[in-house]
Every structure is written in structure tokens, then in C-alpha cells.
Amino acid sequence: MPRRPKPLIEQRTTRTALGLYGVLLVLPTLVFAWLHWRELVKTQEAEMAAVPEEAADGARRIWTSMQRKLDELVDAESQRPFTDYAEYVLPSEPIGDELRPQRSSLTRGKLPTGILAYFNFDRSIEGSPIDVFVGDDTYGRKGVPESFQPVIEEFRRQRPDPVRIAPLGPEGQPRAVPLSAVALTLGDGDLACLNSCSQYMIDRAMTVRVDPFRLQFFLDSEGRPRAVASRRVRATVGPVDVPADAPCLAPLIKGFHLQQGFLLDVQWLLRELPFDIASRVLDANQSLVRPDTSRTMDRLDSRFATFYPIEKLGFETFRPGDAKYGALDVEIDTSEIAARFRRQKRNLLAVAAMLVLTLATGMTLLYRSVDRELEQARRTQNFVAAVTHELRTPVSTIRLHGEMLLDGWIEDEEQRKEYYRRIVRETGRLSTLVENVLEKSRLKESVSEPVAADLSEVVRRLEGDLTSPTNPDDLAFELAPNLPPVLLTHEGVSGILSNLVENARKYAPVPPGGEPILVRTSWDGRRALLEVLDRGPGIPDEERERIFDAFYRVGSEATRTATGTGLGLHLVRLHAQAAGARVSVHPRPGGGSIFRIAWRPA
Ligand code: ADP
């Protein structure tokens, strides 16, 4: 049976309650969750925005460290006297009778890290050979290693026409260098000749100016990167008389213009050094990568800062684009940030989901409670209507019949008796109603203490009262022997049975010769059962729980034919509860209802 629609006033009350709940609880919760979410998103954006700056900072740390390392190297090389750029040099003390040259520091031991080779040539002499020194092995005029050839070509290419030796300008910082030291560096190594004029060289010096090293970078003719540090050394000699028998001094007398320096190891400079520094100065989520290896990969969670070491370290370049050679990326892995925010967002969503669940539960409970309250009010209203109806019908019948009897309208003796009987019956109905209402309030307040007894025995004693004197065949009993004793009161069982039997007679009357209403006791293995079975219309599923509520009646006063107050089954439940028993209703196989009261053994 479909539930009847709620009256408008009830709908409004429910709506108001839910509306209030929404405004006071749901709305602030939603606003709070939204604000929190926005805050989270903003923080994430701010953190992400700071990442490029962090990467740039990482790059700065790397190239400043590289700069320091390179400066150290160049500074150390600047200390090396220009005269060391020769295969043999003289010891630092002044010469004696005989020159005793020793191998230059460039030709001894290992090369410093980062340096591939040293070179030296005279720019003032066109076609002057280039001396190349690579540590233990000195090639010098004997020839240069294959790999160095392109560099030499580049030097030759860059070399301008023979340079004139101009007098040293005022800006220079000339130094006086003993002629003997220079002679060994520049001369052709003719020791015999030099020895012969050693006396001459004593106390004579050249004025020499050594420029600072300049850094240059270029791609050679084969496209290989070359980094070079070179300096100019210029020297003049004052007006001196040159002995005719000393041809080995001749080149010195006209002065010279040397270009010397060293070739840097590009592999060390652009790979080993920065990666070594990066491993020390970068944070855990930062790494140094070469753009060609990093960019080709699909790294959505990374941010980069690119820097160009050649440019940053102050190398001069000759061709456009060379300065961009060897670019490096500082890569910041943002996946950790992203993962952290994902975690936080998930937590927020979980909390929000819990809140929604809690609020939804609250809303449902509120809705149910309002609904229950309204239902209760409706039942009370029904009850008032029912009681009014119940009162009015017998009262008007009694009054009508009484007046007719009083006025002497009924002359037939039999008919008069019938009128008296009606008056008595209606009075009985009135008193049942009053009894029911009284019984309800009494059961709510106090009941007598239940005692352990045999259920079948108690029911047997009620058989007489329940059987109708006019229609004794409409009720049958089936009582199980030897039931375990249960806790009950005599009046409770009587109240239960009289209501159930009365209902059965009212809603499932037995037609002549039909199957009687059955009162049955049994033991289901765990509980003692008292059941009333009829062949009536049965109770719809959705009504099964509610028919035991006070004043609840199936349908409405307008559609019902049977009279009642909606109290009978409620009284049954109150009686059952007072004895600790459970009441339920079930469909009866073959049609009808089974009303069941179940007791646990005492
Ligand atoms: P009343 O009989 O005064 O209406 P009750 O509390 O005794 O009140 O019963 C509640 C409702 O349960 C009744 O209105 C009726 O519709 C339904 N009902 C009770 N007993 C039966 C039955 N044996 N068969 C069908 N319906 C029943």
C-alpha cells in the first residue's frame, strides 16, 4: 500500500528543519573545506613558482665554484716565470763561469689537473716554430702530438703579421730579467756559444713585460672545443754592444714578443669539474644534467635553469655561438612537491568526505526525528479523531434508542428488548474504549511482576473467556504440552490474547463453516511461542513494524470500515515488553496473518 503524501504543513516543518541544519552546519563546513582547499592550492603554486629561482641559485653556486677553481689554476700558472716555457732553464742563482742548465718545470713531472699542454712561440718572427710541452714528454721543435695540431693551426691562423716590438708603454710593469736566463729560453740552445759569452751576460738584463693570462674558447677547424689561456711577453734590451763572437745572443738584442700559455682540458672544465662541484653544492632534489640528455626525456615533474659556463667563466670567443657551447642544466625534481601536495589534497578530501558523511548522517537522523515527531503528532490527531468518532457513534445510538424508548414509540416487546440490548452493547463499546485508554496509561506507568509459569496452562485457563458464546466455532486452540516455564503475568497474556483475537474477529471474520482463528502455543527450540493465526487480508510489508505503534491504524479514518482506536496492538506490545517477550507479525502461508509473541525460557 503506497504511503500517503505528507500534508503541506509537515512538508514545511521538515523543510525548515533541514534548511536550518544546512545553514548552520553544512554551509560553514563547505566554506571551511573550500577555504582550506584554496589555501593548499595557493601554497603549492607559490612553492612551484619558487622552483625556477632555486634552480637558478643552484646554477649560480656551480659556476661561482667553477670560477674559483679556474682562478686558482690560472693564478698558479701566473706565478710560473715566463722563462720556464723552455726545455732548459738556468737555476735561479746567477751564473758562474759556466752555464749549468736544468730541465724546465714544464718538462718535469705530471701536468696539473685541467691542463693538456703548454705552448710558447715568438710572435715577432714570422714562421717561428711553436714549442709544445706536455709534462714528462717534451715535443718542442721535435714535433707536436697529433691532437695538438688543430690548435696550432688556429694559432697560426689568428696570428697577425710579424709584430713590431714597440718600446714598452708606461702602462706595463716591466721587470729586469738576467740576460742569461732569457738567452737560454729564447736562444737556439747553443750552450758552447752561450758559455763563451757568459761573462758578458753577467750584470746585463732585459726589460720584460708579462701580461696577465687571457682565456679564449673556440671550436677548431675540426669542430672540437678548445680552451686556451695565453699571455704576451714582450722584452727589449737597452743599447748594448753585442760581442761579435756571440751569434746566439743576436735574437735577444732586437727584443722579442712571445705568446705563451696553456691549453685547458675542456672535458675536465665542462664535465668533470661542474659535475664534481654539483655533487657537493646541490640539494638532494637538484641535479646537474646536460640539456641534450635531460630535455629529450619526458620529465613533466622537472624545472630547469640553464647556464653557459664559457660565458660565465669569462672566456673570449671568436665566433658567434661559441659562448653557448657546453650549456648545463640544473634540474629540480618537483615530483616530491607534487606528491606531498597530492597527499595533502587526498587527506583533505578524506576529511571532507568524512564530514559530508557525518553531516549526511546527521541530516538523515534529523529528518527521521522530525518525521517521527510529525508522525507522532499525526497519530495523536488520528487518535483524537478516532476517539471522537468512537464516542460519538455509541453516544448518539444510546441517546436515540433511549429517547425512542422514553417517548413510548416502541410498542413491540421484542423490539424494545432489542433496543435495550443495543444500548447495553454500545455502553460496552464505550467502556472498552475507556478501558483501553486507561490500560495504556497504566501499562506505561506500572505493571505487576512477571512470574515463571507454563504458557499453555495460562492460555488454557483463558479459553472460556475468549470463546464467543454466540459463535463458539470461530476459535480453535492448539496448546503444546510441557513447555519450559517462561516469565509472564496472567493479565498480560489475557490482554495480549483478547486484543489479538478481537482483531482477528474484526479484520478476518470467520465465515460460516470457514477455518477458525487458531490460538497456538509451541517451542521453536529456543523460545516459547504464543501465536494467533487468521485467514484475513494479512498485513502489508511496510506496515508490519508500525501497526504496533500507539494509535496507528492502517489507512485513514475516511477509508476504514472497521472501528477501532489504534491502541489494541500497541497494548499487545506493551504487555509483551513488560514480560520481556518480543512481538512480531508474519504472513501466513496460504493467506492471512500470524501474530507471534516469543518468550525466552525463564
Ligand atoms: P484498531 O484495531 O483499533 O484499529 P489495532 O492496534 O488493534 O487498532 O490494530 C492496528 C491496525 O492493524 C488495524 O487498524 C488494522 O488495520 C491492522 N490489523 C490488526 N489486526 C489485524 C488482522 N488480524 N488482520 C489484518 N489487519 C489487522
Image: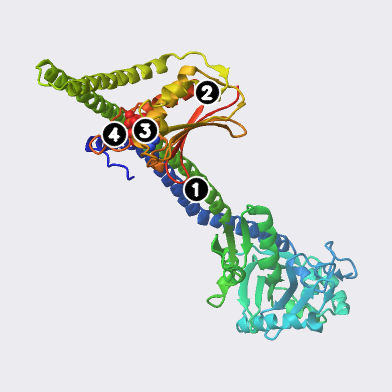
Residue at the image point whose x is 45% and y is 49% from the top: 41
Disc 4 element: loop
Q: Type of residue at label 1?
A: Lys
Tell me how the rendering is colored: rainbow
Cα separation between marks 3 and 4 = 11 Å
Q: Position of residue 408 (x, y in %)?
A: 10, 17
Cα separation between marks 1 and 4 = 63 Å
> Which residue is disc 1 drawn over?
345
Cα separation between marks 2 and 3 = 27 Å
> Which residue is disc 4 drawn over?
562
- Marks 1 and 3 in Cβ contact (< 8 Å): no
Q: Quadrant of ligand 1?
A: top left
Residue at the image point whose x is 23% and y is 23% from the top: 422
Q: Which quadrant is home to the N terminus? A: top left
Say left or right for 130 vs 367: right
- Would the CB of label 1 be found within 8 Å of ligand 1? no
Disc 2 element: loop
**Disc marking residue 580:** 2
> Which residue is disc 3 drawn over?
505
Q: Type of residue at label 2?
A: Gly
Instruction: In this rendered view, identify the residue nearer to me: 305 or 101.
Output: 305
